[in-house]
Amino acid sequence: MRGLRLPRSPSVHRPSGLSRYVVPLVAALAVLAVPSVASASVVTIEQLATARWSTPIQCPDGSAASNGLLIVQSQNFFDEGVTPDPNPPISVTFRGQCPDGTFSWGAGQPTHLPTTQFDPDLAYVSVSGTYENVRDNRGGLHTVSVNANWTATGPTVTEDDGHGNWLIQRPAAATATIIFDGNTVIDGTANYPNHTPFIRVEAFSY
């Protein structure tokens, strides 16, 4: 006579109703937690000093360009927490009107390593550099040297939106000596109308 087969205990061989739901719930919560880490904002810092001069630089035909605007600026971008480049690029750009049309050029990659001093309190900035083979919009090549200085003239203005974006800026006086193809075209204070030179540090969060 065969012995009786006892029923298997459900508590030993099958998960309970509660455990069937706990495991998937934990996995779902783990998946939801990933985007919050990936979406952490990145803060980029910009250091900027800029000034403008009104000057009649010579046109290719030998005449003087009217409405000449020359801009000098030191601009440095870096992520928050990263040591900034101690010698960021210096850009020098010009645009004027010649008898036969617009004459313009821009220098942004110095042939010799530029020298920059950017005071953390925005009290001063000084930059210098030399550029060779600067191409104008007519195809000509030029050599440009710049030595510019900013000195703060007013109080610090701060703006903060509370979301990681902020700005600290000071008005400044700027002087520069700029040599274009061996000729001194700027030697004095920034004089472009309705534009005050400034020194600024700004943060962008994204």
Image (tube, rainbow, N blue to C red):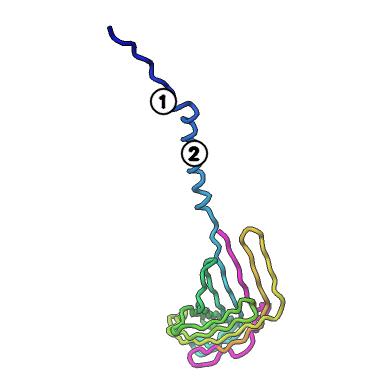
- Which residue corresponds to the image point at 45% horizontal and 85% vertical from the top-left? 112
Residue 31 horizontal/vertical position (percent)? 48, 43
Q: Secondary structure at mark 2?
A: helix
Residue 101 seen from this side: no
Residue under circle 2?
Answer: 26
Split into 4 quadrants, where in the image is the N terminus? top left
Place residue 158 in its image quadrant: bottom right
Taking the magenta stretch, the answer to whether it contains residue 160 is no
Residue 25 horizontal/vertical position (percent)? 50, 36
Residue 189 seen from this side: yes
Residue under circle 1?
Answer: 12
Residue found at the far right of this picture? 155
Q: Is residue 46 above or below residue 190?
A: above
Contact, mark 1 vs mark 2 (Cβ under 8 Å)? no
Q: Nearer the viewer, residue 91 or 85?
A: 85
Give the mark nearest the N terminus, 1 or 2.
Answer: 1
Residue 53 horizontal/vertical position (percent)? 61, 83
- Which residue corresponds to the image point at 54% horizontal and 60% vertical from the top-left? 42
Q: Nearer the viewer, mark 1 or mark 2?
A: 1
Q: Nearer the viewer, residue 138 or 157?
A: 157
Bounds of the magenta span?
178-206
Split into 4 quadrants, where in the image is the C terminus? bottom right
Alpha carbon separation for disc pair 1 and 2: 23 Å
Is disc 2 surrounded by few (<14), some (14 to 19) or many (20+) residues within 10 Å? Answer: few
Which amino acid, by three-letter code, is at mark 2?
A: Val
Which amino acid, by three-letter code, is at mark 1?
A: Val
- Which residue corresponds to the image point at 56% horizontal and 85% vertical from the top-left? 65
